[in-house]
Image (spheres, rainbow, N blue to C red):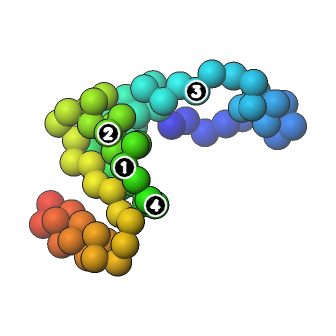
Amino acid sequence: ARPYEGPAQELMVRQLTSPVRWRRLIENMARDGFDTFIEAGVGAVLKGLISRILPQARVYAVSCAQDLETIRREVGAYA
């Protein structure tokens, strides 16, 4: 994840027509110090992708209030 620079319209066109660089984005986040990832919403596809890219990362999926409370307690233990 890096900040975008340049005209917004050109960036939007590139965003829609360029390949997704998911692996690079996740690896950059890890390199920048992120070690915990939380996916919000139904399902856990992104959680699975991140777990394969960064096996050592803590990765969670939140789909209801109970999940959120459980994750809050677990992540809080690392703070």
Residue 10 position (above or below residue 61): above
The amino acid marked with disc number 2 is Gly
Residue 28, image x and y in percent? 41, 31
For this orientation, the residue located farthest to the left is 77
Q: Which residue is mark 3?
A: 20
- CA distance for labels 1 and 4: 8 Å
Q: Earlier in the sequence, mark 4 or mark 2?
A: 4
Q: Nearer the viewer, mark 1 or mark 3?
A: 1
Comes first in the chain, label 1 or label 3:
3
From the image, tell me which residue sits under label 2: 48
Q: Which mark is residue 64?
A: none
In terms of secondary structure, where does tag 1 sit?
Answer: loop
Q: How dense is the environment of label 3, judged by Cα within 10 Å: few (below 14), some, or many (20 and up)?
A: few
Is residue 79 shown above or below 26?
below
Q: Secondary structure at mark 4?
A: loop
Q: Which residue is mark 1?
A: 44
Q: Quadrant of residue 55?
A: top left
